[in-house]
Amino acid sequence: MPATRDRAQVTVSRIDNLDEVPGQPYGRGGKRKGNARRRHTVAKVLGSTMLVLAMVTALGVTFLYRHLNGNLNVVDVTSQLGDDRPEEVDVKGPTQPINILVMGSDARDGAGNNIDGLTGDGQRSDTTILFHLSADRKSAYGVSIPRDSLVDRPECFDDDMNSIPGGSGAMWNEAFSVGGAACTIKQFEALTDIRINNYVVVDFRGFRDMVDAIDGVEVCIPQDINDEAHGIVLKAGTRELGGEEALSYVRVRHVEGTDGSDLGRIQRQQAFIAAMAAKVISGDTLARVDRLIGFLNAATKSLTTDIENIGRMARIGADFNGVGLKRIQFITVPWQYSPADPNRVEWLPEAEQLWEKIRNDSPLGSFRKGAITAGEVPGKGNRPGNGNGGGAASDGPSASATAPGDQETQSAAEEAEERREQREAAGLCA
């Protein structure tokens, strides 16, 4: 679609000049909240909303700038992170790598977020994804972190700079419960020695409205899902899910034939994200102004972030758009079930090799094994070698961990069979 690409580039160049808008009462960054009390605008599911938003923001139109910028809830948490942060890696070249931490939770407060009538007891982060954009802008990937990971949580600070004590053997998502985005960023940086450049948090309502804005997302459900205890009932088949059904699909854990863990849910989320990203930047959305504007409006309303304005989002979006869907991949940190508690997981030693690659902006190598690509449409017969990328990671211990080096050791046929088994284990179509 050459015409669309050219139009996107022109739009981005115009938005580049809109960091300061004449008459904008909030100055640079629009509706900046500073250290005001953070809204619980979070979601447990669409951790990659930033990726999808970034790609399509680059295709927006300039006259929407004021409106979309006004939707953003901008919260700067820099003061809460302290001075003992990892150093940024200086890569030779005109651009530097970008690390964006995307978070969500199952908090029910806020308009449209109490989806099941449950009363919330604070905010919990059930989705955390690190997005890394390479310095050469030729590749990007998202790394999911299981919420049940056992980690050592460092001391962090709340909005009023009161100390929040750390803890050993804590669940990953406790950081968000006790200290929100700042505490989760502090925890991630302490454990990985990777500097976070920006963060994004998104809510239930935003996810649902984004799916509805593009008239649903097609997925393949291999069998009926009957999780009546949580009010989630979905029929098998390949079809487009609207916002409510999509929210149920990416939230469900108890699928017959799987172990009901959070790990299977992560793979279903990654598969849905891939399909959604593909539809958002397809002609079906870009050629429909109502869909495009509706999606951008829903996305920006749902975001809490430290990205100052839509202009900067557009520039990030242009970078992601330049990478191309087929080179944007989703993986999960190498893990195993905890010997101390089978309901929890621990990162394998190979995880440090993954973090080192990210720190040094190096290619993922064999960590790409089992990755889902944003260019893949689940259930459409994707196979290695057809340009659509791979399948889901397994619903058992991380497949990536078995081959941490850079050498590919499996044949295409072996990878295809392993991918099929992994998908079935995660409750996805092969």
Image: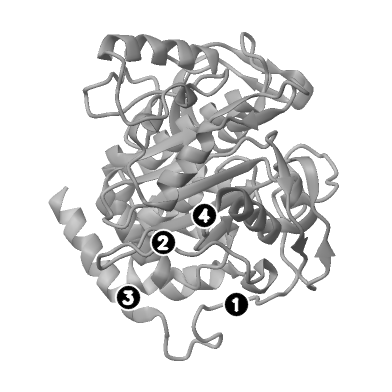
For label 2, the residue is: 89
In front: label 4 or label 1: 4
The residue indicated by pointer 1 is 32
Q: In the picture shown, does residue 79 fall above or below 379?
A: below
Viewer-nearest of labels 2 and 3?
2
Indicate left or right for 179 with 303 as reference: right
CA separation in Å, label 4 and label 2 = 9 Å
Asked if the residues shown at circle 3 and circle 4 are in contact, with their CB atoms under 8 angstroms apart, the answer is: no
Query: What residue would you read off at disc 3?
Result: 16
Provide residue 33's location: percent of width, then percent of height: 65, 75
From the top left corner, tell me how far across and down residue 134 is, in percent. Answer: 34, 53
Do tag 4 and tag 2 residues touch (Cβ < 8 Å)?
Answer: no
- State the residue position of label 4: 194
* Res 276 visible: yes
Residue 380 found in image quarter:
top left
Identify residue type, mark 1. Arg
- In percent of the image, x 78 and y 21: which residue is there? 229
- Within 10 Å of disc 4 (Cα), the crowding (few <14, some 14-19, many 20+) is many
Q: Which of marks 3 and 4 is in front?
A: 4
Q: Which amino acid does label 4 sit on?
A: Ile
Q: Nearer the viewer, residue 393 or 212?
A: 393
